[in-house]
Amino acid sequence: MNPEEFRQELLKNNIELSDKQMEQFAKYFEFLVTENQKMNLTAITEASQVYLKHFYDSITLGFEYPDLLNQEISVCDVGSGAGFPIIPLKIVNPDLKVTIVDSLGKRIKFLNELANKLSLSDCEFVHMRAEDAGQDKKYRAQFDLVVARAVARLNVLAEFCLPLIKSNGYFLAMKSENAPQELDEAQKAIATLGGKIIQTNEFKLSDNNEQRVIIEIQKKKETPNKYPRKAGTPSKKPIQ
């Protein structure tokens, strides 16, 4: 998917990118590839693959949850790495109020520099473990929406993300073909943490045959104070 194909594919979904936004994506790609030579940000560096598997893939979240494309909502991206999925969505919708929580300082530095290069406002990049953010009053139960892509299995991810969401807010987990198995093993964790599974949406990534699944969970009850547990515990001992 070259940049013009990317633009046209989004247009099919009623997303019309301006020349300025196309320039932001071009700068994003250039900076990602340059910085990737210094640190491990992504294994995908070929332009057509970055536009498809990082930029376009990230924006598909907005196809399933349109508020991401046109509303002024607060979104936290947990374990975003090089900014996926939320930075491509922020380029599409500058009104998003974005927070990224990531445990690696080098990635936070990259994101701050990226935001400056792309002239993005209303962005906060937090160098913190998700478990610590979930117990911090500044972030706990503060977001309309929390998103995560390729971070951990869902039973672990739920403990990272659900504590951060406001009552009646949403958690969107981006998964691949293993989603049904992950969803089955995460049922207890989701319920324990105050969540309710609303739906799962399966689709193919453009003309690519790769399976994508978006799991939508709503925060129906307050997360018990004991969650998230101390850093490292959710991964070692998932709620079962």
Image (cartoon, rainbow, N blue to C red):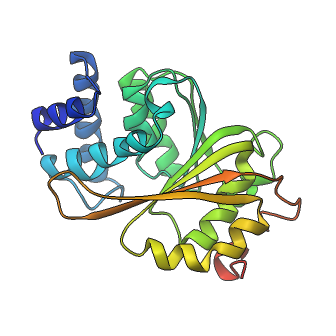
Q: Is residue 143 above or below residue 238?
A: above
Q: Position of residue 192 (x, y in %)?
A: 78, 68
Task: Return the residue nearer the eye: 232 or 87.
Answer: 87
Q: Residue at x 69, y 66 (%)?
A: 190
Could you tell me residue 7's position as x and y percent? 18, 31
Give the mark count.
0
In this view, 68 is above or below 176: above
Q: Is residue 37 left or right of residue 182?
A: left
Tell me which residue sits at (45%, 34%) in the image. 66
Q: Quadrant of the C terminus?
A: bottom right
- Please identify the quarter of the rendering in which residue 142 is found: top right
Q: Is residue 133 visible?
A: yes
* Quarter of the view holding residue 86: top left
Measured from the top left, where is residue 109 in percent x and y? Answer: 49, 41
3 up-or-down from 200: above or below: above
Vertical comparison of 153 with 33: above or below: below
Image quarter for residue 145?
top right
Q: Residue at x 26, y 23 (%)?
A: 17
Residue that appears at 64% across and 76% down: 235
Q: Residue farthest to the front? A: 199
Q: Look at the image and tell me whether residue 129 can be seen.
A: no
Q: Quadrant of the N terminus?
A: top left
Q: Position of residue 59 (x, y in %)?
A: 35, 41
Along the viewing direction, whichever of 36 and 237 lies nearer the viewer? 237
